[in-house]
């Protein structure tokens, strides 16, 4: 089929590569505009744009996807289908209803669970045992369209949002070609979403604030779900630190208070049980093992982690 691919971040790269290796014809690739990133605030092309440029494909980067000139440009391409994977803007009806075979979206959850912008993070934070990728036909609401295919994967205790995202991206790549083939030959029939819906709202930087009064088991899931972005964080002696890996420990201690600090162990009390911090990032420094952090920072038992900078 002739298609246009909408995608922006690393998650959308594996499905895009699957299309490149297929018999489908990619007419154009649509990504978010280039943005500043990193310490030097350099303007960088997104991962999908980089892949598209390597393949010699035209790249469109509308500031607003609702722009009438952009929609006319799509109409002139006359795609049979539009594939959307983590593009980053809500598509208007003029695009959703443009291709004859519709807009196919890969969503990183088992719909109708975790509709919204951050399904991978919230599935980990909420302690789900499994998740997956759903291919669906888009409609005018958010992630409510009929299901085409889906594939599951287990969520392990060690899965971070970054690790799980990589696995789901590969699953999406495996799911996309059978979805398009089945849609083209009529073997895959769209079916309405069934069951109670849940939602995964967009995460903001401040959502990473650690609430030490929660149980250690929940905090481990929270830290994993916030890794790599926005990062789970707290304050110790007014120093802001991000925590990227931690495991529950047996024991009782006041929530947020350091109950053990040695040359290679940093254990903090929580609302239930304790939390052993394994990887940490001081302000302005790279992520490091807790042993390296403790070599350069004197942390004493009784010191307190807070969720407020001024405490």
Image (cartoon, rainbow, N blue to C red):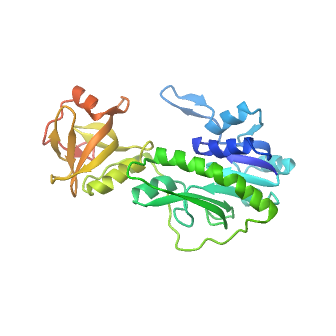
Query: Which residue is at the front of the view, 21 or 195?
Result: 21
In the picture as drawn, the residue positioned furthest to the bottom comes out as 195
Residue 305 position in % (x across, y down): 23, 44
Q: How many marks?
A: 0
Query: Which residue is at the front of the view, 4 or 91?
Result: 4
Could you tell me which residue is drawn at 78 percent across and 37 percent down? Answer: 58
Residue 289 position in % (x across, y down): 31, 33
Is 167 on the left or on the right of 54, as rendered? left
Could you tell me which residue is drawn at 58 percent across and 41 percent down? Answer: 10
Is 272 on the left or on the right of 245, as rendered? left
Query: Which residue is at the front of the view, 40 or 129?
Result: 129
Residue 162 position in % (x across, y down): 48, 44
Please tell me whether residue 144 is drawn above or below residue 301 in the rendered image: below
Could you tell me which residue is drawn at 29 percent across and 53 percent down? Answer: 211
Please tell me whether residue 285 is drawn above or below residue 23 in the rendered image: above
Could you tell me which residue is drawn at 50 percent across and 30 percent down? Answer: 38
Residue 290 position in % (x across, y down): 27, 34
Q: Is residue 254 visible?
A: yes
Q: Is residue 202 visible?
A: no
Please tell me whether residue 253 is drawn above or below residue 13 in the rendered image: below
Is 8 on the left or on the right of 228, as rendered? right
Q: Quadrant of residue 261?
A: top left
Which quarter shows the C terminus? top left
């Amino acid at each position: 089929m002739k298609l246009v691919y909408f995608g922006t971040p690393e998650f959308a790269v594996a499905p895009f590569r699957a299309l490149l290796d297929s018999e489908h014809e990619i007419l154009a690739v649509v990504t978010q505009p280039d943005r500043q990133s990193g310490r030097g605030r350099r303007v960088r092309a997104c991962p999908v744009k980089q892949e598209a440029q390597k393949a010699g494909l035209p790249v469109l980067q509308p500031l607003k996807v609702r722009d009438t000139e952009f929609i006319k440009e799509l109409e002139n391409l006359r795609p049979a289908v539009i594939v959307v994977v983590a593009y980053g803007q809500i598509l208007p009806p003029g695009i959703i209803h443009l291709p004859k075979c519709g807009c196919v979206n890969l969503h990183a959850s088992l719909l109708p669970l975790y509709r919204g912008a951050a399904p991978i993070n919230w599935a980990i934070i909420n302690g789900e045992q499994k998740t997956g990728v759903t291919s669906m036909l888009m409609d005018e609401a958010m992630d409510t369209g009929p299901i085409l295919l889906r594939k599951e994967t287990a969520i392990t205790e060690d899965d971070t949002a970054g690790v799980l995202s990589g696995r789901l991206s590969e699953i999406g790549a495996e799911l996309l070609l059978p979805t398009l083939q089945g849609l083209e030959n009529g073997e895959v029939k769209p079916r309405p979403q069934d069951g109670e819906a849940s939602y995964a709202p967009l995460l903001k930087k401040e959502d990473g604030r650690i609430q030490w009064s929660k149980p250690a088991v929940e905090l481990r899931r929270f830290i994993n779900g916030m890794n790599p972005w926005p990062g789970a964080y707290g304050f110790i002696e007014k120093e802001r630190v991000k925590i990227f890996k931690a495991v529950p420990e047996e024991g009782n201690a006041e929530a947020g208070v350091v109950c053990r600090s040695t040359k290679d162990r940093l254990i903090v009390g929580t609302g239930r049980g304790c939390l052993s911090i394994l990887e940490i990032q001081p302000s302005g420094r790279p992520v490091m093992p807790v042993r390296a952090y403790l070599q350069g920072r004197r942390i004493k038992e009784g010191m307190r982690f807070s969720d407020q900078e001024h405490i």
